[in-house]
């Protein structure tokens, strides 16, 4: 078995954006699971290529609900949700928020939340590209 030679990468300061570089944002949306396909399609329509999806459980104002199982009532505190994460340039943030809102909205309590945060640095592991080039 041959060992693959690891490529030498040049050292570079992390977290220092080049002057004039556009900023990168992370959008996290907590949505109802049955809305995932609609949200994915809406994001693809505006040109967003990659998303990360995580199954989650939680509650907010919706609280939980009671369910009957074999004649006994159980309180379900944590409700199934899906967390969708995307990392994009500033120029797409408003379009992405609007696309997520329109696709995920049912008009009922528990539709979810959208969080936007700054990303200090994004680096593609394979090539070493950084910033928007890494996305």
Image (cartoon, grey):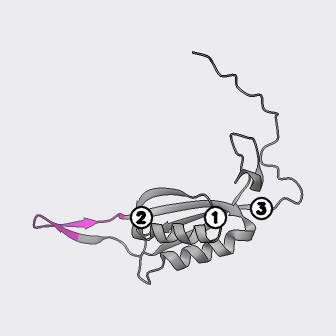
Quarter-wise, where is residue 89 in the image?
bottom right
Q: Is residue 33 left or right of residue 9?
A: left
User: What is the x, y in percent for residue 59?
Assistant: 40, 68
Q: CA distance from mark 3 to mark 1?
A: 16 Å
Foreground residue, 53 or 109?
Answer: 53
The crowding category of the residue bearing disc 1, from other C-alpha atoms within 10 Å (few below 14, some 14 to 19, many at least 20), is: some
73 magenta-colored: yes
Front tag of 3 and 1: 1
- What residue did someone put label 2 on? 81
Asked if residue 75 lies in the magenta stretch, the reply is yes
Q: Which mark is residue 107?
A: none
Q: Residue at x 49, y 66 (%)?
A: 30
The residue singled out by tag 3 in the image is 23
Q: Residue at x 65, y 67 (%)?
A: 47
Q: Main secondary structure of the magenta part?
A: strand
Q: Which residues are magenta?
A: 67-79
Residue 48 shows which numbered tag? Answer: 1
Instruction: Return the disc, 3 or 1, that comes first in the chain's sequence.
Output: 3
Q: Position of residue 57 (x, y in %)?
A: 40, 60
Image vertical order of residue 135 relative to residue 67, above or below = above
Residue drawn at 40 percent across, 69 percent down = 34
Give the quarter of the figure containing the C terminus: bottom right
Looking at the figure, which quarter contains the N terminus? top right
């Amino acid at each position: 078995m041959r060992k693959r030679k690891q490529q030498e990468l040049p050292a570079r300061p992390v977290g220092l954006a080049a002057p004039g570089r556009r900023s990168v944002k992370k959008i996290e949306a907590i949505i109802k699971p049955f809305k995932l396909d609609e949200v994915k399609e809406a994001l693809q329509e505006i040109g967003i290529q990659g998303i990360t999806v995580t199954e989650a459980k939680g509650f907010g104002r919706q609280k939980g609900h009671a369910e009957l199982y074999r004649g006994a009532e159980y309180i379900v505190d944590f409700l199934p949700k899906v967390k969708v994460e995307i990392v994009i340039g500033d120029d797409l943030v408003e379009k992405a928020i609007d696309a997520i809102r329109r696709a995920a909205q049912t008009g009922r309590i528990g539709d979810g939340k959208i969080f936007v945060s700054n990303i200090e640095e994004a680096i593609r592991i394979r090539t070493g590209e950084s910033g928007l080039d890494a996305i």
